[in-house]
Amino acid sequence: MSEYNVLYGPQMAGALVSLIPVMVVFLAAQKYFIQGIRRDRPERVSRRSVDVREKRDRVPPDQGWQNRLIESAAKRPRPKAATDECQGLPLGRMPTYISGMSAPAGPKVTNRELREHRRKAERLIRRTRRTVKHAVRGQTASATAMLRGAVFKTLAALVVIWIISPPFVVPVEGRVTSGYFVRVAPEARFWPRLEFHSGIDIAAPVGTPLRAAKSGRIVQTGYNDLAGHHVEIRHILGFSTFYAHLDRVDVRRNGFVFKGSRIGTVGTTGRATGPHVHFEVRLFGYPVPPGVFLLIDTTRRTIWRAVTAR
């Protein structure tokens, strides 16, 4: 077994254990979604069966209510012939005395009856459509409410987990002397010169312990004229943190550190006008505002100080 596995195998196992809260939240959200799917499945099946019955009963436009109307009229008793000439003849064979043509077979239906039955059929169709629309809207509203509740519960669980164990912690106790974005170069004497500051500077005495803001693997340690002694730690989801101007580095490359573990001490190495640490948060290699990620830990510390000061 290599030296790396001997030294950092337990730490890797501990990192996996630290992911258990995230897995618990994920499984809880998955449970709510599965319950919602199971709850809506009978409704979808019943709605599907209704659609199948409607398709089965569907007939061409000119053969629906007309056929039913003719069948109902055929069951009525036939009237007797009005004249002696037509006595004993079926209704369909009564002479019409019009160009030698005979009347069509079957009972006669007036246009008024046809219009009345058509209006009844249209009212029934409209009423059925309204009923189906109300049912679908009710199912959609219930599913939306259930999904909203699951999302709120998941977010509440994440907030509780983040308050107990914030994703990023402040690397060192001190005062922020320079923020993120554009600033005046500190070494400018006679004429102010603007420059982009990719992180924040936290002032602290030389030798103050510096800790990792988040668990991860150390991908770079070294020294240069600009950053002095520096450390870069790579985290999950494309995040990485960078620490510069250290007086001493207590970790080595390819090692694994936990959140809050000591990685070095504050110093004045490199381009520094006083003892401080330059802290950066990078997303896929690009610097982003660190204060956004330190907000939860900073708020928690402020509340704790206010409570303990009483």
Image: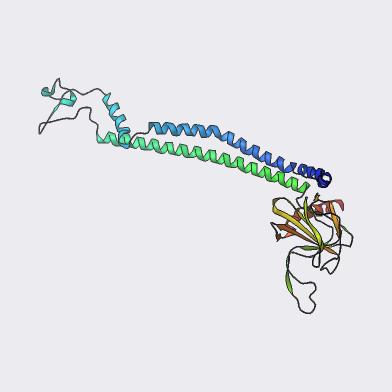
- Give the percent coordinates (x, y) of residue 123: 38, 37
Q: Give the side of residue 116 with respect to residue 99, left or right.
A: right
Residue 253 in which image quadrant: bottom right
- Give the percent coordinates (x, y) of residue 135: 50, 37
Give me the residue at 47% from left, 31% from top.
Answer: 49
Q: Give the side of residue 125 with respect to residue 105, left or right.
A: right
Give me the residue at 36% from left, 38% from top.
Answer: 122
Q: Give the side of residue 40 with respect to residue 186, left or right.
A: left
Towards the viewer: 217 or 129: 217
Give me the residue at 58% from left, 34% from top.
Answer: 39
Q: How many marks?
A: 0
Vertical comparison of 183 with 80: above or below: below
Residue 191 in which image quadrant: bottom right
Quadrant of the image containing the N terminus: top right
Give me the residue at 78% from left, 47% from top.
Answer: 165
Vertical comparison of 88 with 59: above or below: above
Towards the viewer: 212 or 299: 212
Q: Is residue 231 visible?
A: no
- Give the percent coordinates (x, y) of residue 299: 78, 54
Q: Is residue 217 visible?
A: yes
- Give the percent coordinates (x, y) of residue 136: 50, 39
